[in-house]
Amino acid sequence: MSIYVKRMEESDLIPREHGPYGTWVNPLSPKFGAEELGFRRNRLLAGRFSGLYHAHLQQEELLIPLQGRAWLRHKDGFEEVMPGQLLFFPKGKEHCHQLYNPGPEPFDYLALANHTQEETCYYPDSGKEMTLTRSQDIHSPSGGWVMQQGFDYFKGEMEPERFWPPEILQPRP
């Protein structure tokens, strides 16, 4: 395998927005041909949540803030995150996490996780679990993940702000 250096282009960000959730993604691992490490650049829009409050049961995850600031919700509470920090989430139900960006600028970060053949995500706010399986095409924009048939990802998850302190949710000037 060769070593590659590539630039993260703004034009490569793919919008993924639904209700209160708004993260644009740039799947990088397929561009490098990575086989055992998944990584992508994420941009969390102002006033939006990164995704559902969740934990990974088979994967470890590392987030590396690049620019901007956001708030992290985890089992012990809430804390502001910014460039210069590393956010590591071991596998297991007790390591749930979610980001929120009060703005005004976007929050950019790298997300890295080990590739596994199967992954189960736990969503305590709605009391559900979802199992994902990896297809043969790990280099596709989805990273090769195939969602469990008939799973309603957003069911019971459209009001994430009810779990957050109001003072954190206030837009920043």
Image (cartoon, grey):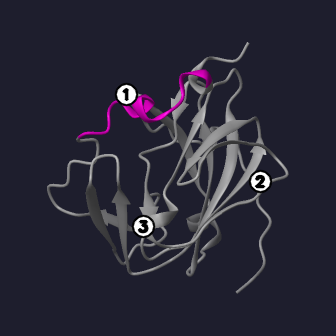
Residue 13 x/y as whole percent: 59, 42
Neighbor class of circle 3 (other Cα within 10 Å; few <14, some 14-19, many 20+) is some
Q: Is residue 27 left or right of residue 138?
A: right
> Which mark is first along the chain, 3 or 1?
1
Residue that protrudes farthest toward the bottom in the picture? 1
Q: Which residue carries the number 2 mark?
A: 7
Indicate whether residue 163 is drawn in magenta: yes
Q: Amino acid at mark 3?
A: Lys
Decide: is 42 above or below 105: below
Q: Which residue carries the number 1 mark?
A: 19
Q: Nearer the viewer, residue 47 or 169?
A: 169
Which quadrant is home to the C terminus? top right
Decide: is 171 above or below 14: above
Residue 29 x/y as whole percent: 60, 66
Q: Amino acid at mark 1?
A: Gly
Q: Amino acid at mark 2?
A: Arg
Residue at image point 25% right, 56% down? 128
Q: CA distance from mark 1 to mark 2?
A: 30 Å
Residue at image point 55% right, 80% down? 35
Q: Which residue carries the number 3 mark?
A: 93
Q: CA distance from mark 1 to mark 3?
A: 25 Å
Read off the magenta span: 156-167
Which quadrant is home to the N terminus? bottom right
Decide: is 152 above or below 67: below
Indicate whether residue 77 is drawn in magenta: no
> Which mark is first along the chain, 2 or 3?
2
Q: CA distance from mark 3 to mark 2?
A: 35 Å
